[in-house]
Image (spheres, rainbow, N blue to C red):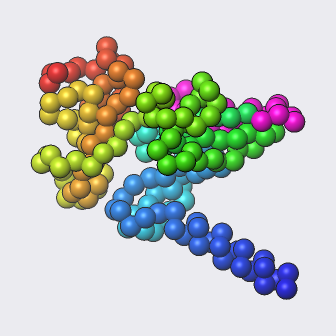
Amino acid sequence: MGKVILLMLSLCVASSIANRCANLGLYTLPDENSCTKYYICLHGQELANECAEGLFFDPTTGNCNLESNTMCLLASCPADNVGSLSLVPSYENCSNYYACIRGVASRMVCSEGLLYNPVKKACDFAERVTCALPIVKHSYTIIDCPLTGVTKVPHNDDCSKFYVCINGRSSEYTCAGGSLYNPKNQRCDRPEKTKCFNA
């Protein structure tokens, strides 16, 4: 009986790992247990990858970067909170947060329509929460999107926006917190570091 339960548990875990990558073209996903590991997803197939030594995976750009330029939950989950619970916001999704106990993070998800409020340390209505993540929405604007590969394209009319093209399909992103898209380093940046010509 114990072997049957173990086999069923193994199948469930393998199934959830296998379904991590949706069949949406080429994109990357962070590893929930490591700041240096990530997954490359291509048409539903998953390829595990790891950043070079000294670099962390940055889910906002999909690339490896210096630790100081990334926001890694695992690096901020306190290991010295013995016997107490720490709640830490997710840096990938504003409706998620992590419960940290003894340095171990468990992902929690707010109910539909709510976002995690780090000030109140609780799920709250979206209008009461400042979400510092890029906001993704599907784009219906016609842009020059390459038919293959992954490319970032600046927005024609708004310096705080840009498109991510994946195999000819585009999604529009908006930089958070007053930052502007910098086509030189292909990421959201401080306004003084960008040259905006379409404001």
- Is 84 in the magenta? yes
**Residue 126: quadrant of the picture:** top left
Is 9 or 50 nearer to us in this picture? 9
In this picture, residue 8 sits left or right of residue 190:
right
Q: Identify the residue shown where x is 60% and y is 40%.
A: 97
Q: Quadrant of the C terminus?
A: top left
Q: Position of residue 113 (x, y in %)?
A: 46, 44
Q: Which residues are magenta?
A: 68-85
Q: Is residue 43 above or below residue 60?
A: below
Q: Position of residue 70 (x, y in %)?
A: 52, 32
Q: Position of residue 198 (x, y in %)?
A: 14, 24
**Whether residue 132 is visible:** no
Question: What secondary structure prevails in the magenta region?
Answer: loop
In this picture, residue 107 sits left or right of residue 173:
right
Question: So how many labels did they put on this image?
Answer: 0
**Residue 148: quadrant of the picture:** bottom left
- Is 99 in the magenta? no
Q: Identify the residue shown where x is 14% and y is 34%.
A: 156
Q: Is residue 22 above or below residue 68?
A: below
**Whether residue 19 is visible:** yes
**Residue 49: quadrant of the picture:** bottom right
Q: Identify the residue shown where x is 82% and y is 34%.
A: 84
Is 184 or 34 nearer to us in this picture? 34
The residue sitting at the top extreme is 192
Q: Identify the residue shown where x is 30% and y is 25%.
A: 180
Is 104 or 75 nearer to us in this picture? 104
Q: Position of residue 149 (x, y in %)?
A: 28, 56
In this picture, residue 9 sits left or right of residue 46:
right
